Image (tube, grey):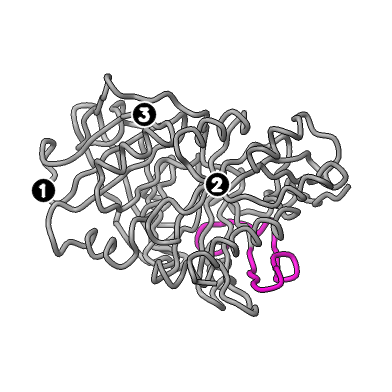
Amino acid sequence: MSTTTLNLPKLYAEAQDFMPLNGTDYLELYVGNSKQAAHFYKSAFGFQSYAYAGLETGQRDRESYVVIQDKIKLVLTSPLKSGTEIGKHIDKHGDGVKVIALWVDDATVAYNNAMERGAKSFMEPRIEEDADGKVVRSGIYTYGETVHVFVERKDYNGLFLPGYKAWATPAYNPKPVGLKYVDHMVGNVELGKMNYWVEFYEKVMGFVNILSFDDNDISTEYTALMSKVMSNGNGRIKFPINEPAEGKKKSQIDEYLDFYEDAGVQHIAVATDDIIGTVRELQSRGIEFLRVPTTYYDVLLDRVGPIDEDLEPLKALGILVDRDDEGYLLQIFTKPVEPRPTMFFEIIQRKGAQSFGKGNFKALFEAIEREQELRGTL
């Protein structure tokens, strides 16, 4: 039985929480058609209608639908006119994550701390008010055109943000599929830029590098990549950062950079307490997942040791398992959910494990390569 050893309490203690983060507030995706995207995430992923901003609420240049599932909020935003920055972003990158919003106690302090440490400003602190109180937001750029927005909402009792109204679809609200919260988000950056962004998160945001993988850990016969996992001090925010490594053929990171045309968010990992039930429901709604050969399961229990789940459902669904010294995890990855082979989702259930599935890397990446070969991009 193989395990990954982590000393997370010691590593977290090394983080400098000069801008304490309470968690992920929301993720904003720029998309070509916000209304259609909202219904996709509802029908396919089990999100619920929540909030809306657009012409009816005074927005003249954009329309946003907010969908929610437990602690996960997705904001799906489209432009209302040509020539906008949102439209240019979609034209270059396709649909994808623009904003990773982080919940903080003081958005002004968080912004000032980041700027003093070398961040590039996206949005100076601004107060947004309505009858339900006020929200303070500020923001900085990170890799590519991705931004972090700091959200302070201690003086706000409204639904989401000022400028939004409730959005309800009582006749059509598919039931949730069991998604709980954002576990981590993975960014793909250009060759040679991983350590630059690692240092950015260390210096600007006080994060610490809790795990590192090189091309010996993450490689197949044809492709390889390198990755470092950054975390804040309380462990609620984790950002693995990937860069390509030299290989015989084009890696998944190279493919992403080619089609996204920049660094950006590669995948969103969302947690569940019942991965078998969640994946069954997602498959029944048309979500497609990467599959590994069934031989993966022949030696699974020898590799990870005893687990609570029966092997047959895991094998039937294609769910992967890995273990570290804290426990084990179960994970599975969707195929890209956009026309470009860029953004996808990971569904993860942690049974104590705090790692990221190192023992699955080879099987997973070979599955990705099979998809790349079908696309003609390997």
**Going from the N terminus, do you reach mark 2 or mark 3 first?**
3
The residue tagged 2 is 289
Left or right: 111, with 325 as reference point: left
Residue 259 sits in which quadrant? bottom left
Task: Give the vertical position of 242 relative to 102 (above or below).
Answer: below
Name the amino acid type tagged 1.
Arg
Is disc 3 placed on a helix, strand or loop? strand
Of the residues shown, which amino acid type is indicated by label 3?
Answer: Gln
Residue at position x 53%, y 56% in the image: 186
Does residue 209 appear to the left or right of 171 in the view shown?
right
Q: Which residue corresponds to mark 3? A: 48
In the rendered structure, which segment of residues is drawn in magenta?
Answer: 202-227
Q: Position of residue 218 (x, y in %)?
A: 69, 65
Q: Earlier in the sequence, mark 3 or mark 1?
A: 3
Residue to which mark 1 is pinned: 60
State the image coordinates of residue 23 (x, y, percent, origin top left). Answer: 50, 40
Element on which disc 1 rests? loop
The answer to which image quadrant residue 93 occupies is bottom left
Q: Is residue 219 left or right of residue 231?
A: right
Indicate the secondary structure of the residue bearing disc 2: loop
Q: CA distance from mark 3 to mark 1?
A: 25 Å
Seen in the picture, residue 213 relative to 348 is either above or below; the reply is: below
**Which residue lies at the image location 66% right of the left edge and 37% below the top edge?**
316
Does 273 sit above or below residue 256?
A: above
Depth order, front residue of 125/294: 294
**21 in the magenta segment:** no
